[in-house]
Image (cartoon, helix red, strand yellow):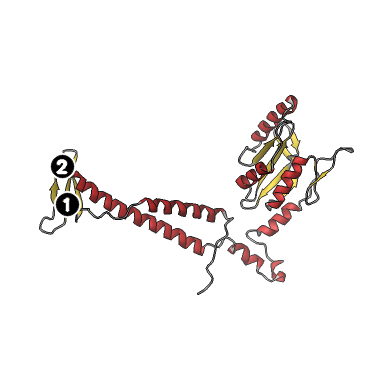
Amino acid sequence: MGIQYTPPQNDSLVLAAIRQRSLLREQLAKIPPKPRHVPIGNLRVVTNHNRPQYYIVNSSDAPNGTYLPRKEIRKAQAIAQRDYNRDAADALKKQISTIDRFLADYRPGALDATYTELHPGRRVLVAPVHEPDEDFIAAWLHHPYTGKPFEINAPEFYTGTGVRVRSKSEVIIADALSRAGVPFRYEYPTSVKGWGTLYPDFTCLDKRSREEIIWEHFGLMSAPDYAEKTVQKIAHYAASGYILGKNFIATFETAAKALSVKQVEHYIRALLI
């Protein structure tokens, strides 16, 4: 027996399929087993004077069935529920089976493999339909740019990978991004409507979607002028398409409330991995 293929757990389509399968399994578990005391036969429903009438059909001797008076409506309910439960269970099992087959057959890396598995001499001759993630990320990280300069006597803070940043809080964010394997550029210039060029603290790459997500840390919110400028900056970011909680992460700090590693990791899990 061969080794069973396990689809990658970081693929968005795989994650959606797994979530949907779990939901379907939960719904299937809610369907009770077939009850013991259900009348034998099928339920026939006809409309008479805009009101439903119910018949039990269980014999060829009475092809139209035996009429159920209102006092026996529970028999009709039992049969109808039995049939519904059966059909619902069949539908759920079919959908679960479909997802199982999809997860067994789906290979999100198949296209990239047709390129990366080529002989190096052949690969240089080919323009791939889709640039492999590894190549795309490497090119993204090494894209040249000029960041915001540091003042001569500015305090020096360095991340675990040697990137110079402006505060201890930025060290926390940068190191958390590195631990999570999230590629980022520090203070990459970004054009913002009504403001010109801004340098978001971090421009992060969502490796799944290849979307860029900016991260600004506002560390002096206790200062009224700084807080006012922050509100304006967030509004200008929004006008340029950077929406909080979508492709824009903002963290805040006051004199009384410092940034926590736990908070940073929460944002990374929610929006970047």
Q: Position of residue 15 (x, y in %)?
A: 54, 54
**Residue at the farthest left position:** 61
Left or right, 73 with respect to 237, comes to left
Which of 234/190 is in front? 234
**Residue at the farthest right position:** 152
Which of 182/145 is in front? 182
Which residue type does callout 1 highlight? Ile
Residue drawn where x is 37% and y is 50% of the image: 30
Among the two numbered marks 2 and 1 on one chain, the one whose residue lies closer to the N terminus: 1
Q: Position of residue 43 (x, y in %)?
A: 20, 51
Camera-side mark, 2 or 1: 2
Is 129 drawn above or below residue 166 in the view shown? below
Q: Is residue 188 visible?
A: no
Q: Position of residue 157 (x, y in %)?
A: 82, 43
Separation (CA) of disc 2 from disc 1: 14 Å
Left or right, 114 with respect to 84, comes to right
Q: Residues within 10 Å of mark 2 (few under 14, many from 20)?
A: few
Residue drawn where x is 73% and y is 55% of the image: 139
Which residue type does callout 2 highlight? Lys
Q: Position of residue 252 (x, y in %)?
A: 69, 35
Which of 95/1 is in front? 1
Left or right, 270 with respect to 256, comes to left
Q: Secondary structure at mark 2?
A: helix
Q: What residue does disc 1 label?
A: 56
Q: Which mark is residue 245?
A: none
Q: Secondary structure at mark 1?
A: strand
Q: What residue does disc 2 label?
A: 71
Residue drawn where x is 24% and y is 55% of the image: 36
Q: Residues within 10 Å of mark 1 (few under 14, many from 20)?
A: many
Q: Is residue 177 visible?
A: yes
